[in-house]
Image (tube, rainbow, N blue to C red):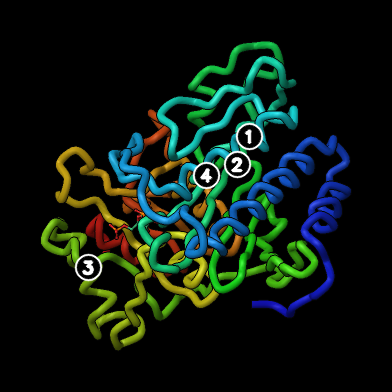
Amino acid sequence: MNKTAIGITITQHILSQQRQNPEATGAFTTLLSELIVAAKVISREVNKAGLVDILGGTGDVNVQNEKVQKLDLFANRVIVERMQHIGQLCCMGSEEVADLIEIPAQYPKGQYILVFDPLDGSSNIDVNVSIGTIFGIYKRTNTDPQAEVMLDEVLQPGIRQVAAGYFIYGSSTLMVYTTGGGTGVHGFTLYPSVGEFLLSHENIMIPERGKIYSVNEGNYQYWDKKTKKIVEYFKGSENSLCRPYTARYVGSLVADFHRNLLKGGIFMYPADLKDPKKPTGKLRLMVEANPLAMVVGEAGGYASDGHGPILKIKPSELHQRVPLYIGSRKDVEIAEGLISGEK
Ligand code: FDP
């Protein structure tokens, strides 16, 4: 991690990046600024979660057939309501909503598409473990602002994201984002007393190889032989470290990913046979894997589905699931090699 530069606000940072791009119109800056406001509202609510009647489930299940927590719904509503009126989006896609979220007719539309997981790791809400919001931003392919948005415009491979990042609501609230193309990955910590995100982690680079492996080993019996071999490689002694990697698994993707981004290591959520309806793993390509893949790639790491880059997968549906191996480049390449049989 590089030196801390206290005092630069996220807004100053986004504006300075905008000035480096002569074609920038400010639309993207407006979009990110409003998303940051939404995250501040979610952060405030997460921080008081134990104090008011917002903990626990609603009794419903979402489109992924998972129990919906009240805070999931709150976070989803805050993002949709704040983002729909800014005039920069043509539609949104949320982990909590089955279909594309259209921009209501009374608001102007723009060229950008926002996909997000409003509250990732939500099974951890009730136990005070870090949770987060993950986002990816795309430009629509049809340049006619009046044209109806087609699902195919949203189902773009992650490599086409123009920005991606996440907010962590943990011991402090942090935003990590990148706009790609060599601009770097930067982290900002929310200073509650001033209500601003200040630059705290400039130009984050993930170590080429780590010492941590993160996976839910409770799924061991549902894995195929190759997947078992990958995990045995990292926990055994016949690996590049010549000793076992350290196991760290919070069960909150944002928290597990962020730790490994700073310290190095590999996070895995492989395909398993636990639920025959989800043979491709649990995590979602568009709202989880792609944004984090863009961040890790820009930080010098790599994300793979075990066969190739996550960022090159053309989604076939909004809520598509994908096996995920993400983190330090050399560790992820080992996992890929073991799956392809090359290592
Ligand atoms: P959660 O179900 O709590 O929302 O994708 C959701 C996610 O959490 C990730 O944040 C996390 O990495 C993963 O699922 C945890 O899944 P397991 O409980 O199956 O390990």
The amino acid beneath tag 4 is Phe
The reply to whether the residue tagged 4 has its Cβ within 8 angstroms of ligand 1 is no
**Residue 293 at x, y = what percent?**
50, 53
Q: Quadrant of the N terminus?
A: bottom right
Label 3 to label 2: alpha-carbon separation: 35 Å
The amino acid beneath tag 1 is Glu
Q: Going 60% across and 41% down the picture, which residue do you hit?
A: 79
Q: Which residue is mark 4?
A: 74
In the orientation shown, which residue stands out farthest toward the top? 147
Is the Cβ of the residue at disc 4 closer than 8 Å to that at disc 1? no
Q: In the image, which is nearer the foreground, mark 4 or mark 3? A: 4
Label 2 to label 4: alpha-carbon separation: 6 Å
Q: Is residue 241 above or below residue 55?
A: below
Is the Cβ of the residue at disc 3 closer than 8 Å to that at disc 1? no
Mark 3 or mark 2: whose residue is earlier in sequence: 2
Question: Relative to 221, is 18 on the left or the right?
Answer: right
Mark 3 or mark 1: whose residue is earlier in sequence: 1
Dot 2: within a 10 Å radius of its alpha carbon, few (fewer than 14), some, or many (20 or more) residues? some
Residue 78, numbered label: 2
Is the Cβ of the residue at disc 2 closer than 8 Å to that at disc 4? yes
Query: Is residue 299 something one can see in this rendering?
Result: yes
Query: Is residue 329 something one can see in this rendering?
Result: no
Label 4 to label 1: alpha-carbon separation: 11 Å
Label 1 to label 2: alpha-carbon separation: 5 Å
Label 3 to label 1: alpha-carbon separation: 38 Å
